[in-house]
Every structure is written in C-alpha cells, then in structure tokens.
Amino acid sequence: TEVSTLKMTPRKMEQLPGLGEKDILRSFQLMPGISASNESSSGLYVRGGTPDQNLVLYDGFTVYHVDHLYGFFSAFNSNALKDVQLHKGGFESRFGGRLSSVTEITGKDGNQKRFNIGGDLSLLSMNFYAEVPVGKKFTSVLAYRRSYQGALYNAIFEKFNLGGSNAGANEVRPGPGGRQVQDAEVTNYFYDLNGKFSYRVNDKDMISLSFFNGTDKLDNGSALSAPGFGMSGRNFNMNTTDLTRYGNIGSSLKWSRKWNERLYGNTILSYSNYYSDRDRTQERSSVNADDETINTKMGVLETNNLRDYSLKSDYQWDILRGSQFQFGAFSTFYNIEYTYAQNDTSNVLDKHNQAFLSGAYVQSRTKLFGDRLTLIPGIRTSLFSITGKTYTEPRFAATFNISDRLTLKASTGKFFQFVNRVTREDILSGSRDFWLLSDQVNVPVSSAVHYIAGLAYESNDYLFSAEAYFKHIHDITEYSLRFNTSPAGFSYNENFFSGSGVARGIEMLAQKKAGRLNGWVSYTLGEADNKFEVYSDQYFPANQDVTHEFKAVSLYKYKRWDFSATWIFATGRPYTAPSGAYQVTLLDGTTQDFFTVTAKNSVRLPDYHRFDLAVNFKLLKGARGERKRQEIGYIGVSLFNVYNRKNVWYKTFTIEDGSILETNVNYLGLTPNLTLSLRLR
C-alpha cells in the first residue's frame, strides 16, 4: 500500500535458497528494482543507485559497511533481527543523507516471558543467540556469529582473493636448489556481534540500548627465507604482507515516550565507526658483498576511517482520525580520514575532514474521502558546516485506492548526500572505493530528484504491481589515475572528477501469496547513465547499469518439508578495457609500458544467470501423534549455482611485450551447504 516499500521478516528468509546463511540483504535482492547479479556485494543496488546511496539504519544508527567475506554475505545476523523495511525511492522527510534508498532494520527485543537460546551451524559459520528476560520490565538478546576455515570458506576466499594462495601455518620445507621456504600463518575469518537491552520504565517510557560489530580479517601473507641465495651465496629474506581488515561498530541509546494519547516521541543518541586497513606490501632484506644488510619495501598502504556521532528526535502527533503530523530534528558530527600510500613513504592521497550536519523536518499524513486518498507532503532542511549552506528537500507522496484491490501510487522529492563513497577507477585490475566527506573542492555535495508512479492489484491470494521511476543525479564523484599528465610536479588531488547521472526504468511483479505452492516472478527494465566531461561530453552506462533483470522464486510446502528454487538472469554490466599497449624507452635507457583505453564503459561483461535450490526439514518437539508439536528448528541443504555457470565478476589485464593479456575473474561455481538450526522454543 505504500510507495516503493518492501517489508520482510527473518522467518520468511529461512525458506529462500542461497548458501545456507539466512541473509536479509541477499533476500531483498530477489525483489524487483534491486540488482541480484553482483555476488561481490551484499549491499543493495537499488534502481540504478549504488550501495553507498542506500541509507542503512540499524536501530537508529547508520551502518556504513554491510559486507562479509568480500561482499558474499551481509554483516547482519538474522537471529538478532525483528524486521526490515526497504524504501526503494521517494522516501519520507524523516530520512535523509542518501540519494537512492533507505534500509530500516529493527533489532529483536528478546523474549519477554521466558529464557530462550538457539543457534545455527553450517559449513561456513557458527551462530548462537540467547534471549534473557529479567523480571517483567527488562529484556535482552545477544547474538554472535563467527566463520571458520572449512571447505566452503576456503572456496570463497580463494575465489575472491587474488593476492595469492591460502598457505599453511608456519610450515618450513625445502625448496629447489637447497633453499628453505617458510609460509607465514594465515588467519582469515569474519564475525559479528549484536545485542539489545530494553527496559520499560513505566507505561509511558521505554529505554533501549543496541550495539553492533561486524569485522573481517583477510590475511594472505607469506614469508620466504633463502640462505645461500644466488651466485654470491648471500642470505635473502622476503616478507609479503597481504592483510585487509575492515568492519563497522555501532551503538544507539533510544528513549521512547508516550507523552499523551496523541503524542509519541523517540530520541536516539548514536555512534558509528567504519574502518578499513589494507596492507599489501613486500619487504626484502639481503646481504651484499660488503656484508651490509639492505632493506627495501614496496607496495600499497590504504586506510579509511569514518566516525559518526549523532543525536536525533522524532515525534508523531495524531491530530484527528486518519491525520498525523510528524516532525523532528537531528545533528551529526563527522570525522573521516583516508590515506593511500606507496612504498611506506609516498602518500598518493591524504584526506582528513570534519563537519557538522544539522537540521529538521516536518511532514503530515492525511487520509481523505473515506481513507481512499492518502497524502504525505513534507520538507527537510539541513545545514552543512563545510559549505555553510542550507539544503532544502521538499517531498511528496500519495496513494489512491481506486477500489478495494486496486491502488494508484506516486511520489517525488529532492535528496542530498554529504558523505560519499568515491569510486577509484583502476583499469587493469578492477575498481576500488573509499568514503570521503563532501568538501565542495574535490568532492561536491551530491543531489538527486525522484519521480515515481505505480499501480498495484492485490487480493487475498495474488499481487500484481508495476512501478516506473526516474532519477536525475547531480555532482557524483569518481577518482581516476588514468590522467597522469606529467611524471613530475603532479598533484594526485587533481584526479577527482565530478559528473551527473540519470536512472530510469520500470519494474513489474506477479506474486502468488497463498497455498502450498507460492512465489513470485519479477522483471526490471532499467538504465543508469553517467556523464563526466573528463571522459566524454555524452552520457555513458554507469558501472552498475543492468538493462534487463528477471527473477523467479518458487516455494513449496509439503508436511514438514520446505522446498525452494530461484533463477536469476541479468544482462552484463559495462566496463572499460585497454584497447592497445605500447612500450617507451626512457632517457635513462629503461623501458616503461603504457596503454590506451576504450570509451568509458563501452564494453559489457557476458550475461549473468544462476539457478539455486534449497530444502529444509522441520524439527519438532513432542511425542509423535500429539495435536500440537512445537517447531524447534530445521535441517537444510542448499545448492548454489546448480548448473555451475561461470559468471564473470570482472576482468584483469596485464601488459606483456606490448601485448594485452585478458583474464576473467569469475564468481563461484556449484557450491553446496548444509545447515542445522535449533532453538529452545
């Protein structure tokens, strides 16, 4: 009934196929308008937008990074979640700071009456949770998940990590020519920890404390020791570091109060920290003819640290029956650092910005003509300290019930984004990205305007809907190293480029909601184009552009068995490739390779398609034949990519003797998983 809004609960996710992990964000990717063809990101590409343009709120605080294990899984433990709402566009004035969409996650409060414990065990991770009530006023829930390096984890790690092989632990073995080889200990894992503590002070006041921590450590380092190396017989040692550590820590303290029968309010104090440390360096030490030890270090060091301190209050006043007035205020302090260095001495890029963002919003929700027409006008204003400017965002949404089953929906609005994840273009080995604060010099404040219209028909058994959207985006930023005009006197800060974008499309859904056999099919026809004058004065396909995407989901229940299947098809995403290579001899006699490139994103990857299957068998407590037996879990088997399709993630290119060698980096092939889920009640 709402414009561009989806809702989902963790219990429904158990039935969907995948890799055996109940994943809320992967589940949303099976819906229309949300891309499902990018296995390397559990972030949501909504209607031509990018994951950083999707505001993710967990009990009121912002989560800036939602990925585990190179993006194959999301960082949210379904055992700690109550429900999730996704606003795909045209969202209300109470949300801000993003251009595309909003994902609103509500944590589970815990069992109010009895102690409960449960968990999941799969070939990838262990997952445990506990719900502990204390008296009649206090509830709590804790959930912890950690991966372990089994066959499934290693298969994903080795497929997605290109730094080298997954070596053994401190193993010393003889190598060719009498050399000794030592492999450094490899430790790769992810974990997440969720908690929520709620205390009902009285009939009017409720206080809750939530926290979240999701962390990945990906280590592919190694060590080489070669005594008597070479003709001189001197010792040679080389340590290769390939360590990436990233994650998000967040917490919120929420006070909810019912001031009277018509006025409600929530005040939230929150903190969020995204961190990413990447060390891909090589340190060598050797002894020369004069018995002097020579140390050299080369490689890349990259650090990104974002801190967010926020305070916001939201109120709702029920003026009359069917009429509400909502208002609130907010303030956030940002502290963001990003450094990109080479050889531990040369800083390619060093950014550190701080800013305050403060503002307020008002909106109303009014029902007219016997609740057939609902109007939601609103406005949001923000003051950004770096620019000293005020940004105004008018919004409007409406739904009209043509009949009991047929609803017409529309919305429009303006949206600003002050914290941006900038894409760093890397032609030879795929793109990377990092978070920066808009500074109006290198990274402008970006904005978007949405126009959405749709029609939905819904009965007790069926749902048919169609929505069309158009988004015009201004001042998006990209960072590229392809335009190095001079080897000397060059400033890397000049490599920030700003442009604009357009996203348009139509999405259709047909769903059977009831019966043993149910599910849905969806189709999205979309286009996402960007224009950066440094590349072209014409629009070109954005990195996330997918023209056609079709999804079919089938669910079947038979006694204690749940069967499910999904099939996904998407046209290939665009990319930029080298078009030629050549070698230049420099004045000192050395040679250097150079390459030319095709037009920006003028080449496309092959089409993507995948078929997944899953079956769950419910476990019941109680004697056979009892009228009511309690479900206490399930045993599940899943098959990911059943027909072993080789879907291309991206391509890498190397230059050898003036020629370009192209390599496909593929996603996972056929991958099985087994899951055991148990709970006390």
Image: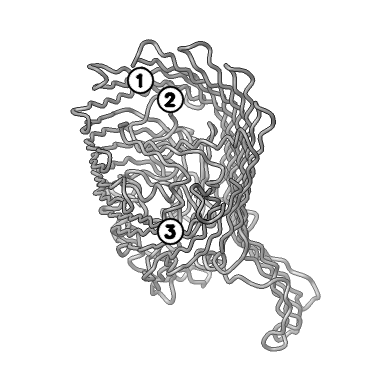
Instruction: Identify the residue at image location x=26%, y=53%.
Output: 547
User: Could you tell me the amino acid type at mark 1?
Assistant: Gly
In this view, the mark in front (3 or 2): 3
Instruction: Identify the residue at image location x=39%, y=59%.
Output: 563
Q: CA distance from mark 3 to mark 2?
A: 42 Å
**Residue 639 appears at what percent x and percent y?**
43, 65
User: Could you tell me the amino acid type at mark 2?
Assistant: Arg
Q: Residues within 10 Å of mark 1 (few under 14, many from 20)?
A: many
Nearest to the observer: residue 25 or residue 93: 25
Say which quarter of the image contains residue 565. Answer: bottom left
Instruction: Identify the residue at image location x=64%, y=32%.
Output: 139
Q: Could you tell me which secondary element the residue under label 1 belongs to?
A: strand
- The residue that mark 1 highlights is 378
Question: Could you tell which of marks 2 and 1 lies nearer the N-terminus?
Answer: 2
The numbered mark at residue 94 is 2
**Residue 368 appears at what percent x and percent y?**
25, 16
Say which quarter of the image contains residue 648. Answer: bottom left
The numbered mark at residue 561 is 3
